[in-house]
Amino acid sequence: MRELSVVGVRVELPSNQPIVLLKEVDGDRYLPIWIGAVEATAIAYEQQGVKPPRPLTHDLMRDILAALKAPLNAVEIVEMKENIFFADLLIGDGVRVSARPSDSIALALRVGAPIRCTDQVLAENGIVIPDEQEDEVEKFREFLDQVSPEDFAG
């Protein structure tokens, strides 16, 4: 397993499909995952520190886990099958629950849980951005500083 960090979310043009970009913590590979608008908003809200007046679904999940004293220990992206990523939530004392990566990432950000990916998934789907394209990644980070979660509302 390789640990990943969340670079951020953006909208892929021209399809207007949101994407979350993850980066290998101890490496140079990126893992792009296309996600839904609701999940993109949830991830962007958490990254930007936006606190809605009422809990969103991922906030509710965080609160339920806390109330049950069942911590989210990690998120693992475990498989890609037919262009669909699969993830597991590792909860409490060895409970593993299958979940969409987008929901898993939104929840992990809220509780500070690590996000990991199998070597195989990263080897098959990870991309290396050449040094000359690092400028593009920096532009992407600048874009993330400018974008608001409402930009992902469909």
Image (cartoon, grey):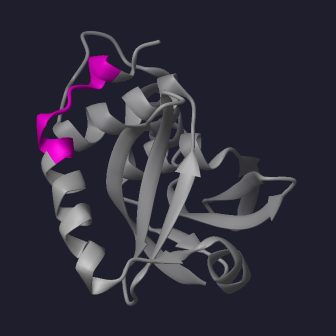
- Is 106 colored magenta in this rendering? no
At 40% from the left edge and 30% from the top edge, which residue is drawn?
Answer: 42
Q: Nearer the viewer, residue 111 or 79?
A: 79
The percent position of residue 64, horizontal first and vertical second, equals: 52, 32
Left/right placement of residue 112 relative to residue 154 reads left
Pick the quarter of the image with the N terminus.
bottom right
The chief SS type of the magenta part is: helix
In-image side of 141 versus 60 (left or right):
left
x and y percentages locating residue 36 in the rendered image: 57, 30
Q: Is residue 33 left or right of residue 119?
A: left
Rendered position, 91 above or below 42: below
* First to last magenta residue range: 143-151
Image location (x, y in percent) of residue 13: 44, 35
* 5, above or below 103, in the image: below
The foreground one among 108 and 143 is: 143
Q: Residue 79, relative to residue 71: is it above or below?
A: below
Q: Residue at x 62, y 66 (%)?
A: 76
Do we see residue 40 in this rendering?
A: yes
Position of 151 with respect to 3 (left or right) is: left
Q: Does the magenta stretch include residue 144?
A: yes
Which sits in the foreground, 85 or 105? 85
Q: Is residue 150 above or below residue 26?
A: above
Which quadrant of the structure image shows residue 5?
bottom left
- The spot of residue 138 in percent (x, y) is 17, 63
Q: Quadrant of residue 7?
A: bottom left
Q: Which residue is drawn at 53% across and 83% down?
A: 2
Disc tally is: 0
